[in-house]
Image (spheres, coloured by chain):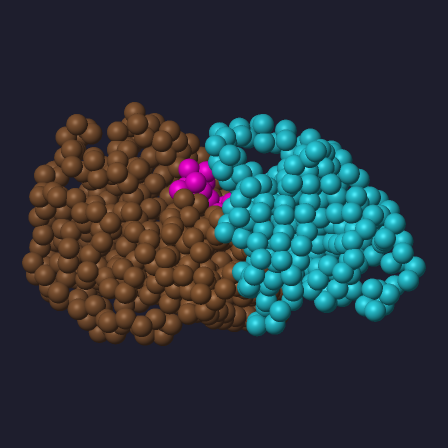
Chain colours: A cyan, B brown
Amino acid sequence: MSKTLIKIENLKANIDGKEILKGIDLEIKEGEVHAIMGPNGSGKSTLASVLAGREIYEVTGGKVEFNSKNLLDLSPEERSREGVFLAFQYPIEIPGVSITNFMKAAVEQHREHKGLEPLSPSAFLKMMKEKKELVEIGSKLANRAVNQGFSGGEKKKNEVFQMAMLEPKLAILDETDSGLDIDALRVVSNGVNKLKNKKNGFLVITHYQRLLDYIVPDVIHVLYNGKIVKTGGKELALELEEKGYDWIKE
Amino acid sequence: MSKNDDNKIITELSEKEYEAGFVTDIETEVFPAGLNEDIIRQLSAKKNEPQFMLDFRLKAFRKWLTMTEPDWGHLEYEKPNFQAISYYAAPKSTAKYNSIDEVDPELIKTFEKLGIPLNEQKALSGVAVDVVMDSVSVHTTFKETLKEKGIIFCSISEAIQDYPELVEKYIASVVPAGDNFYSALNSAVFTDGSFAYIPKGVRCPMELSTYFRINQANTGQFERTLLIADEGSYVSYLEGCTAPQRDENQLHAAVVEIVALKDAEVKYSTVQNWYPGNKEGKGGVYNFVTKRGICKGDNSKISWTQVETGSAVTWKYPSTILKGDNSVGEFYSVAVTNNFQQADTGTKMIHIGKKTKSTIISKGISLGRSNNSYRGLVKIGPKAHDARNYSQCDSLLIGDTCGAHTFPYIESENPSAIVEHEATTSKVSEDQIFYCNQRGLDTESAVSLIINGFAKEVLNKLPMEFAVEAQKLLALTLEGSVG
């Protein structure tokens, strides 16, 4: 029996006084891939943001246990260091900061949190090289400033690369497939599949079934109007594709 | 990140301590406060100056009396009372040290505390340092090594004694005494500073550096720096500054002159960290500085790089006169203002010769209730055929109580010239901070990373030894910014 990675119970959240999440229950075990599907405005991205600790959302109820800690008590950076990674739907540009420097700062703070010595520059660069090969991103990308002037596909590949560098326990992919052509989609999905192991878990948020051809989920949840209205196996995605979201709204 | 956290960051930023703010307890000889011809005569006699220097000072003083303090800067401050300042303060025992063993141990300690070892064994290899405390130069390292190459690097007082013909030829040749109110004052009362002469065809093998420290209360520091790069020579010069924390404002009015002859290149870098005043805006140094270089000969080059983090009020425009054909002027600047600091800084590029080129990259970062202005003039003279200028002024705002202003002036009298100006203003966004947080960076590291990224183009221009210091200084300026 594998261990529970994250357990979300009756999670409720508001933005500007408007309730978006209306009681979410979700449990992901080590080694599992869960997908969340649902129409626009159902609360998918809000769930991702709330789990990452974005403060514009106010949590009004419920609890989230992650790695036997109360996730909601932790700051965004502590959540990251504990092993929660969010691949952004719209990755942010940080002009003038190279990906190498950005990742060096992040990896150092992650290691410090774990009580590890900082990596030597050569060990760090070796790690960069290995991870770049693993997720098949061009080696030049790392010398560029974080997301500055990146194409949509490059931004998403960069997210997967950062995920590889930080080796999270739980990776949340927020509509990572949006705006990707088929080649970029394949690179991104291959990266995720390589990073998958028996100890970590994935929460894949997507609007379309297409991504789930590449990243095959164990469980699919359908989110509608702030609640999970249906849970099933991977065949649920096909059913949704066929019938559309109107079917669940009934 | 909510609005509250934004405010919290700004508040906590203000609580950062000024690390160089200690006072050295050392016996000092100070002139009585006030300024008149007698004081100037005493000063000149004290320094055993030749007649031409005294005449120069008196002429400048008489000119100064006819001038008024400029008020066109985007600055608000109480005008200094020039009669309340003492114009000479010197550590008492300085006859002039022959070796480091004679230097007051308190002084050595002061500079070690600031990370400037005076002992050559301990000194950074590759950097010769002239140290100026209050009004006098106290020590110059690596003098002998430089002498072998024919390079003169000493305090300006020594130069006036030992190389009067060089001083007389070049002093005020770039910044005339009557150029402006502060340069006139400086010319009348300057006490010390650095002098360097690089002979023909010599590439200076180490960085030359002057470290300025104001220690004594109620004194002004008026230093004078003169750099002469003879034909085909090269020198890189660094300047660092700190002062103790004091409640009253201290005045610093320096003049720096650079002469680059044919094919010569001068790189002048400053890391300025004068005491900026406390978080209520009390105290701090008034930094009113005139810095100017002339590319006198063809193919010469002068490059200014500055990282300005200190001072309550900064009024400073390092400028280059591009007289020689094909000469090049560069200005790279990062200015950070916090709390109630005010900076009005920029450059002037005066194109006179043909095919002269200038580049201006200015990065202003404002926090707290500070105001940060870029003011620059690009002037193309009628004979400056095919002159080119590129200017880029970027401002970064942190919080919503600070200000950034850009005042570019362009005057072109030659139709073949190409002048480009770009300006941007941005804020550190909550999205950027959250993105960094999500990767495990705390907010302080995130802001520091974003600022270093913003200023990178300029920081890259600094010599290595200084780049590290500058980065630390930028991080220090932000210390305590955890949201």
Instruction: Identify the image quadrant of residue A48.
Output: bottom right
Instruction: Read off the magenta span.
Output: B456-470
Instruction: Identify the image quadrant of residue A16.
Output: bottom right
State whether the magenta stretch is mostly helix, strand or loop: helix
Q: Residue at x 40, y 61 (%)?
A: B8
Q: Residue at x 48, y 32 (%)?
A: A115
x, y percentage for residue B478? Answer: 40, 53
Residue nearest the observer in this picture, A25 or A42: A25
The answer to whether residue A40 is left or right of residue B436 is right
Figure check: A199 above or below A51: above
The answer to whether residue A206 is left or right of residue B429 is right
Q: Residue at x 23, y 61 (%)?
A: B283
Total numbered circles: 0
On the question of residue B205 being in view, the answer is yes
On the question of residue B201 being in view, the answer is no
x, y percentage for residue B314? Answer: 34, 62
Figure check: B39 above or below A70: below
